Image: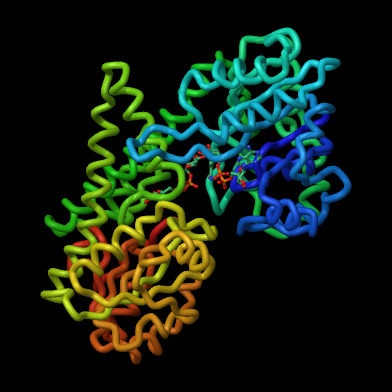
Amino acid sequence: MNVVCIGSGYVGSVTGTAFAVLGHPTTVIDLDQNKVDQINAGASPIYELGLDELIRKTIGKTLFATTSYKAVREADVVFIGVGTPSREDGTVDLSYIKSAARSIGEYLSPDRFTVVVDKSTVPVGTADLVTSIIEEASGQTAEEDFTVISNPEFLREGYALEDVFFPDRVVIGTSHPRARKVMRELYHNLLERVNYEELSKDFTFAYNWNSPKATYFETDVKSAEMIKYASNAFLAVKISYINEVARLCEALGANVLDVAKGMGMDSRIGEKFLQVSSGWSGSCFPKDTAEFLETSRKYGSELSVVKAAVQSNEKMHHFVVEKMQRHLKTLNGKTVGILGLTFKPNTDDARKTQASTIIRQLIDLGANVRVHDPKGMEMFRELNPKLPVGYCDRVEDVARRADGVVLLTHWKEYLQADWKRIQGEMRYPYLLDTRNFLPHKMLVEMGYIYEGLGIGKELIKENVAPLMI
Ligand SMILES: NC(=O)c1ccc[n+]([C@@H]2O[C@H](COP(=O)([O-])OP(=O)(O)OC[C@H]3O[C@@H](n4cnc5c(N)ncnc54)[C@H](O)[C@@H]3O)[C@@H](O)[C@H]2O)c1
Ligand SMILES: O=c1ccn([C@@H]2O[C@H](COP(=O)(O)OP(=O)(O)O[C@H]3O[C@H](CO)[C@@H](O)[C@H](O)[C@H]3O)[C@@H](O)[C@H]2O)c(=O)[nH]1
């Protein structure tokens, strides 16, 4: 089956590579010549564990990359995986989707039935919009010559390949019988794990080989579009909730790590997405909750739980700064080291990261800020060109004459850091670990004044339950 993937970002590059690995001739199309050149050179345009390796193995065989839309002519399935960023008012900017739809329409073959698939996260009703643009640009008839369906993507950055090859579910939104048949055929190898034993020999990174096979769920197009927003918003609510519980634990002297563990043992609740943080962030949750909320308001059915989760999340960013301020009395003139700029580990993605909000607040309060991240410094600097921070290549440099160090992202590099040496660099050994990630007991014994989130003071000295990552 000939596959085209429009967009070679965090979703397009992974999806395109995955279908190529599964044996479908796949062309990735991006307007960005640099990304296309990188893929053709056998390298990934993003940092994602294992992706380089798979691109290298498939490029020129089943994987192709280009800036031209010509491959659409020969395609059975065309995925749209372009960006859907937020506008100022929180609603989604669909300009990339519209432009991709126009280009698809211009190249659509009149001689074959093509299934166009929205993989980007798009508001309910977008498939209709894409349909009308393609009809106008191609002069062809929807549902006869082509159809537009929804197949939302649920991958997480940092675990993208694992999520794509071993998804919990594949959601297909269409009532078109022919499109359903095409999509079942396309996903057959993935659902049945055909040749996965062969693949396992090549993969040098961990895969969840024993997980149950994915559920293939067919529904109508609008419900599929809705499932994506409803899922992301639900996960954001879950994190906001545990973060609020963490604040209360702290006030009451309870240990949120054990509280989350005990809650997660109830299969109705589940242990995942109960990790305390300085707030959720990144390129998906902030924009998707904003759009979902705006849509709910537009239709007179405001999602008040989601609204509260968003507000609570903003409070969580402030809480981290306030906690530091409480401890150091003032931040004016103090030097603060930040560990972690990406919104989570194992990605270079620094879009809409909580680090930028927290750093801005620290600077507004008069602090001098130094930062480090294993993979995200380049993108963070590009996105925040005027932010007056010192970029450090080594963890120790962040700590130089610092009055406090804050860990925002739980990169394993920080677990392995030389904490004795870091302490030696600091003016005052205050360490705020917003992920409760570091070995507290050892650090306290070393002489650090250690604070986590949601852990009562006396518990810090004991061996509290480790964070699940
Ligand atoms: N990042 C994630 O983890 C993730 C997960 C699931 C769903 N999504 C959704 O998937 C979509 C893509 O997200 P992303 O993070 O991959 O975005 P991205 O910004 O990383 O990538 C988008 C790519 O599309 C290209 N592009 C834009 N317009 C184009 C056009 N007309 N023709 C060809 N290429 C074009 C851009 O150059 C860019 O490389 C969004 O809707 C997002 O919400 C993202
Ligand atoms: O227990 C948790 C889990 C996550 N986070 C934070 O929540 C944010 C989002 O994390 P995660 O969901 O792992 O990353 P994404 O790559 O943004 O993935 C989300 O957004 C994608 C884009 O829509 C979806 O495809 C995924 O299913 C959905 O998990 C990050 O800031 C995390 O640090 C927490 O604070 N605590």
Query: On the rendered structure, is 464 left or right of 456?
Result: right
User: Could you tell me which residue is drawn at 46 percent across and 34 percent down?
Assistant: 93
Tell me where residue 401 appears, x and y as whole percent.
30, 88
> Which residue, as the protein is rendered here, is positioned at the far bottom?
424
- Image position, residue 89 (x, y; %): 33, 36
Q: Is residue 235 visible?
A: yes
Above/below status of 319 relative to 130: below
Residue 312 lies in quadrant: top left
Q: 385 or 11: which is nearer to us?
A: 385
Q: Is residue 455 above or below residue 290?
A: below
Question: Is residue 203 among what the camera can see?
Answer: no
* Colour scheme in use: rainbow
Q: How many marks?
A: 0
* Residue 432 left/right relative to 93: left
| Horizontal relation, residue 268 to residue 214: left or right | left
- Residue at image point 73% right, 59% down: 43
Q: Nearer the viewer, residue 279 or 381?
A: 381
Q: Residue at x 26, y 89 (%)?
A: 427
Question: Residue 1's image quarter?
Answer: top right
The residue shown at (81%, 21%) is 109
Which percent across, then down, holds residue 218? 60, 17
Q: Residue furthest right?
A: 61
Name the spot of residue 291 as percent of width and height, x first. Answer: 38, 32
